[in-house]
Image (spheres, grey):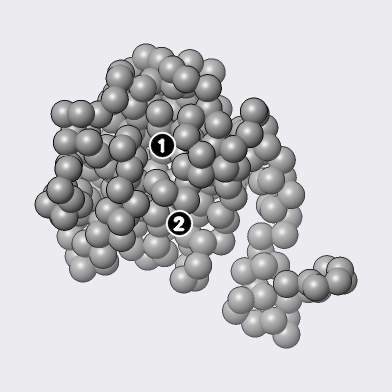
Amino acid sequence: MTFSLAARDPDTGAFGIVVSSSSPAVAARCAHVRAGVGAVTSQNVTNPDLGRVGLEALASGAGPADAVCAMVAADGFPEYRQLSAVSVSGETAAHSGAETLGTHTSVTGDAAVVAGNLLATESVAHAMLGGYTGSRAEAFEERLLDGYAAALAAGGEEGPVRSVGLVVAEDVPWAVTDLRVDDADEPFGELLRLWQLWAPQKAAYRLRGLDPRRAPSYGVPGDA
């Protein structure tokens, strides 16, 4: 029901995840990032709290393999969980329990890891990683989206995708990009529309959090 790509941008040290599912609100449950710490996914039959466990393990200095082990140890049903992690060093790790659904796999690359279940074929995961690493887009978010587009072109998951999300953490405590389509007939198209809306405003909203005196106003009622 879910496939994801978690990565560390080698140029900036940012962490990002793109994830989709036939279930609603996938990013709210499955994607977890923290600036200067790492990225973690918890999917298949999801326990969202494992994201917290994995990030805390990475923050304490554990590598991705140990962070995944910590998530497995913290859960009563690890056989149902599919997990992945990326650290500040770019190392990666993944776990697919024995009860992971359908055609499932994980693929690790340089500072990137793909995990998926109920995939059309295992080649979907390889296509996702290749689409990301082969992208020449300038923005990290766009490279993640290129990976996702390649996965869809390779067949995606067995069922119809209903939700998709994109989250990126850079050098501030909050996610600088956090875009979610929780349920739609064409969620990827809607996510692309949201990214095109957000991209030119992203830096200004980051600056608002750091120093509102220097940040632009958009001059609309209730401007936040």
Residue 135 vertical placement versus 158 (above, below)? below
- Does residue 41 appear to the left or right of 60 in the view shown? right
Q: Is residue 132 visible?
A: no
Q: Is residue 153 visible?
A: yes
The residue nearer to you, when weighing 68 against 89, is 68
Residue 216 vertical placement versus 111 (above, below)? below
Q: Which residue is mark 2?
A: 14
SS at mark 1 in the image: strand
Q: Residue at x 55, y 31 (%)?
A: 162
- Give the mark nearer the N terminus: 1 vs 2: 1
User: Gap between marks 1 and 2, in whole Å?
Assistant: 17 Å
- Does residue 77 appear to the left or right of 143 in the view shown? left
Callout 2 environment at 10 Å: few (<14), some (14 to 19), or many (20+)?
many
Q: Residue furthest bottom?
A: 213
The quadrant of the picture occupied by the N terminus is top left
Type of amino acid at the residue the image marks with label 1: Ser
Task: Name the spot of residue 144 as percent of width and height, x first.
Answer: 51, 39
Type of amino acid at the residue the image marks with label 2: Ala
Task: Name the spot of residue 28 as percent of width and height, x first.
Answer: 47, 51
Q: Residue at x 39, y 62 (%)?
A: 34
The quadrant of the picture occupied by the C terminus is bottom right
SS at mark 2 in the image: loop
Task: Name the spot of residue 87 as percent of width and height, x first.
Answer: 29, 54
Q: Which residue is mark 1?
A: 4
Callout 1 environment at 10 Å: few (<14), some (14 to 19), or many (20+)?
many
The residue nearer to you, when weighing 31 against 34, is 31
Q: Residue at x 37, y 14 (%)?
A: 121
The residue nearer to you, when weighing 18 against 131, is 18
Task: Name the spot of residue 16 as percent of width and height, x first.
Answer: 45, 50
